[in-house]
Amino acid sequence: METTPTRKQQTHDRIVDTAARVLRETGFQGVGVADIMKRAGLTHGGFYAHFPSRDALVAEALERAGEDSRLRLERAIAAGEAKGASRFRALVESYLSERHLKCPESGCPVAALGSEIPRQGEAVREAAQARVASLLTAVESALGSGQPVGTAAVVTAQMVGALQIARALGDNASGRRQLAACRQFLLEQFESERPAGR
Amino acid sequence: METTPTRKQQTHDRIVDTAARVLRETGFQGVGVADIMKRAGLTHGGFYAHFPSRDALVAEALERAGEDSRLRLERAIAAGEAKGASRFRALVESYLSERHLKCPESGCPVAALGSEIPRQGEAVREAAQARVASLLTAVESALGSGQPVGTAAVVTAQMVGALQIARALGDNASGRRQLAACRQFLLEQFESERPAGR
DNA sequence: TGTACATCAGTGAACGCGCGTTCACTGATGTAC
DNA sequence: TGTACATCAGTGAACGCGCGTTCACTGATGTAC
C-alpha cells in the first residue's frame, strides 16, 4: 500500500534531509531548529507540528544520514565490482577517499560525529548506536569469508579513526598522507579474496 | 630561574586543569566559562583577568589535556617495561584499556574530541593538531624499529577509532568486545620487537 | 458545478533561559617610609 | 616595627544575544451537499 506522500510528509522529509546534512557538517550542537527550518524554506514556528522536540529531529536525521551513507557505500561497492575490484577494495577506497575526507556532510555519520555520541541524550545515542552497528555490518559483508572473528571491528575502527585524524589534520598533505597510509595497509592486510573471474 | 608561582598563576593553573578535565568529559561546547570558574572555586567575573576569551581557555586546556595524557601513557609504558613487556604492548594495553574506555576525562583528548576538531576556530584547531601530532610521535616511539613508513599512522588511527566506537557502544559487552578485538590485532600485528633481555 | 465550512500546514511574535562578555567595586596583599 | 597607600585578584550585577519552545492566528486545501 505505497501511497503518495502527503504535503506534510514531503515537508517532513525535506526537514530531515536538511538536518542530516547540517548534522554531519556542523555536529550535534550545530543543528538549530530555526536554522534548519530556514534552510528547508520554512519558518521555525511550524517545527513542532513535525517533531516533538529538537532531539527527535536529531535522532531521525542521524538515521537518515546513516541510510544515505550506507546506500552511497553500496553503490560504490557495486561500481567497484563492475570494474573488477574486490568488494573490500571498493569499500576501503570509497570510505578512505579524498572525497569522503572533504565532504563529511554527505558521508558517514559515525566518522563525522563519533566522539560526540557518548554525550548525547538516550534517544540520540540509541540512534547513533544503530548507525555504528550498521557500519560494522557493512564492513563485515564486504570482507571476504575466512577472516578471523573481530576483523570487521578492526577494519571499522581503523577507517573511522583514519578519517577523523585526517580531517583533524586538514585537507592538505598531512591529512592525505594519513588517509593513504591506512588505505594501503588495509588493502595489503585484508584484501584476501579476489573477485569472481580472476 | 624557576620562581615560585604567584597566587594568580596558581589560580590560572587550577582553572586550566579543571577545564582540561571538563573538556574531555563534555566536549568543546561543554566548557562554559561560569561552570569552569565555579568548579575551580571562583566566580565567573574574574575569568577575563586570566584569559582573553573562552576560546583561549579551550586551546590552553587542550594543550594541558594532551600533556596529561602523554605523561600518563609514558608512565604506563615505563611500568610495562619494568614488568618485562615491550613498549608497544604497554602502549596498546594502556590506550585500549577498560580504564581509558570508562574515563575519557583523564584520557587522550584526540579520542575524546576527534570528530569535533575540524569545526573549531583556528586557535583551538591548531592546538588540537599539535595534540594529534604528539600522539603520532608517541606511537612512533613505542613501535619497534623496522616498521614500514606509515605504521604509526595506521596504529594511531586504529586506537583512536577503537576507543571511540567502544565508547559509542557503551561500557558494556559490545564496547569491551570492540576494544579487545583491536587490542589483540594490534599486538599480533605490530609487536615485532621484544624488550631487551629476552 | 458551485458554494459553505472544516481541517490542515505553516506564520511570526513572544517566552524564558543560559551563555560569553563587561565593568564598577571590594577586600587582601605587598611596598614605602 | 608600624602606619599609609598603591596594586592586585577576585566579586557580583548587568548587558546583549541566540536558543528551544509555545501559541494565537492565517491562508490554502479538501470535503459535504
Image (cartoon, coloured by chain):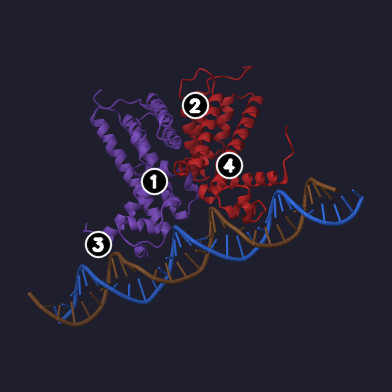
Chain colours: A red, B purple, C blue, D brown
Helix, strand or loop at disc 4?
helix
Residue that numbered label 3 is attached to: B7
Tell us which disc is closer to us: 2 or 1.
Answer: 1
| C-alpha gap between disc 4 and disc 2 | 26 Å
Marks 3 and 2 sit apart, C-alpha to C-alpha, by 53 Å
Q: Chain of mark 4?
A: A
The kind of residue on which mark 1 rests is Glu
Q: From the viewer's perspective, is the residue at label 4 or at label 2 nearer?
A: 4
- Please determine if labels 3 and 4 lie on a single subunit: no
- Gap between marks 2 and 1 measured at Cα: 28 Å
Whichever of labels 4 and 2 marks the residue nearer the N terminus, that label is 4
Q: Residue at x 47, y 28 (%)?
A: A153
Task: List x then y, in percent, for residue A151.
Answer: 47, 25
Q: Classify residue C27 as left or right of residue B28.
A: left
* A138 up-or-down from B106: above or below: above
- Residues at circles 4 and 2 in contact by the CB criterion of under 8 Å: no
Q: CA distance from mark 3 to mark 4?
A: 50 Å
Residue at (72% x, 46% y) in the render:
A7
Q: Which residue is mark 2?
A: A152
Which chain is disc 3 placed on? B
* Secondary structure type for disc 3: helix
Where is mark 4, residue-wise? A60
Are the two marked residues, 2 and 1, in contact with CB atoms closer than 8 angstroms?
no
Assign a secondary structure to mark 2: helix
Q: Residues within 10 Å of mark 3 (few under 14, many from 20)?
A: few
Q: Secondary structure at mark 1?
A: helix
Name which residue type carries label 3. Arg
Q: CA distance from mark 4 to mark 1?
A: 25 Å
